[in-house]
Amino acid sequence: TREQHLQSILDTVPDAMIVIDELGQILSFSAAAQRLFGYDEDEVVGRNVHCLMPSPDRERHDDYIRHYRNGGDRRIIGIGRTVTARRRDGTDFPIQLSVGEAGHDGDRVFTGFIRDLSQQERDDLKMRELQ
Ligand code: HEM
């Protein structure tokens, strides 16, 4: 079925992939996302995606989405950005976030692809120390 096909993709993609609805509620959470954030899928499905980030974005993320749905500009969709995410254990780490959009008003989902930049950040710090 389509569902199983989607699930097999989510289990395989190396980057973390998170699907949310228009209210920011998590609909699916890939295997790589589970490893990266430290949550099982069933612990986060139905929760707001803002549980995966620190302040101030955590308090503002609903407004970011609302602003966009009300006709605001795209600030991440199709552009991408380096932002700070938060693991289950409370530690923060840098990610490259890309967001795509599918569907129409009222029945729309957003798909987030997340690349962990923490190793790169450690390498950059090391390089600076050595210079
Ligand atoms: C917008 C942060 C994850 C979907 C934004 C903005 C920021 C942000 C800073 C734009 C604010 C602005 O300039 O107006 C974060 C952080 C995340 C995260 C720190 C860490 C986990 C996600 C994920 C998704 C998502 C996983 C989708 C699955 C959106 C959408 C918008 C948005 C739909 C509004 C459209 C746009 O600005 O292009 N987010 N986000 N975000 N984010 Fe997130």
Image: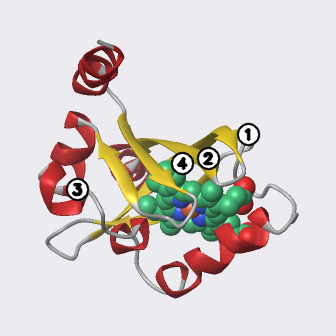
Q: Label 1 is placed on what type of residue?
A: Gly
Q: Which residue is mark 1?
A: 78
Marks 4,1: beta carbons within 8 A: no
- The picture quadrant where one finds residue 52 is bottom left
Q: Is residue 121 left or right of residue 41?
A: right
Q: Which residue is mark 3?
A: 37
Report x, y in % for residue 124: 44, 49
Q: Which residue is mark 4?
A: 97
Marks 4,2: beta carbons within 8 A: no
Residue drawn 57% across the image and 75% down it: 61
Q: Of the two numbered discs 3 and 4 on the same chain, state the one appearing first in sequence.
A: 3
| Mark whose residue sits in front, 3 or 2 | 2
Q: Which residue is mark 2?
A: 108
Q: Of the two numbered discs 1 and 2 on the same chain, state the one appearing first in sequence.
A: 1
The residue carrying pointer 3 sits among few (fewer than 14), some (14 to 19) or many (20 or more) residues within 10 Å by Cα, namely some
Q: Nearer the viewer, residue 127 or 49?
A: 49
Secondary structure type for disc 2: strand
Note whether residue 39 is visible: no
Q: Mark 1 near ligand 1 (CB under 8 Å)?
A: yes
